Image (spheres, grey):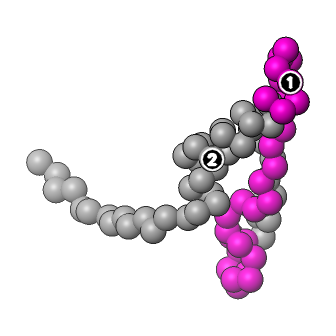
Amino acid sequence: MDVEAEYDPRAQAPGNTDIPVYPQNFRYEVRIDSPASDEELARLHAEVERVCPILNLIRNPQEIKGQVVRAVSA
């Protein structure tokens, strides 16, 4: 399986607010050797894309809340 995406390292430089700081244009290719028909493989592909949590997180971003909590040294 090959997965690729585009990322512009200039995004981390100050002043480049118009360049996204996250990867974009994801692409993947899965090579499979199977006796399954093309139709069966197409159905499998559709089902994997429907239920894959990572793919769906990328497609349908969720709100993420985080915080920094100072640890008290003992």
Marks 2 and 1: which is nearer the front? 1
Instruction: Tell me if residue 2 can be seen.
Output: no
Q: Secondary structure at mark 1?
A: loop
Numbered disc total: 2
Label annotation for residue 37: 1
Magenta span of residues: 11-40
The residue positioned 72% from the left and 43% from the top of the image is 46
Write the residue at 43% across / 65% down. 64
Q: Residues within 10 Å of mark 1 (few under 14, many from 20)?
A: few
Residue at image mark 2: 50
Magenta stretch: helix, strand or loop mostly: loop
- Image coordinates of residue 30 in percent, x first then y, are 81, 32
- Under circle 2, the secondary element is helix
- Quarter of the figure with the N terminus: top right
> What residue sits 59% from the left and 53% below the top?
56
| Residue 55 picture location, percent across and down | 64, 49
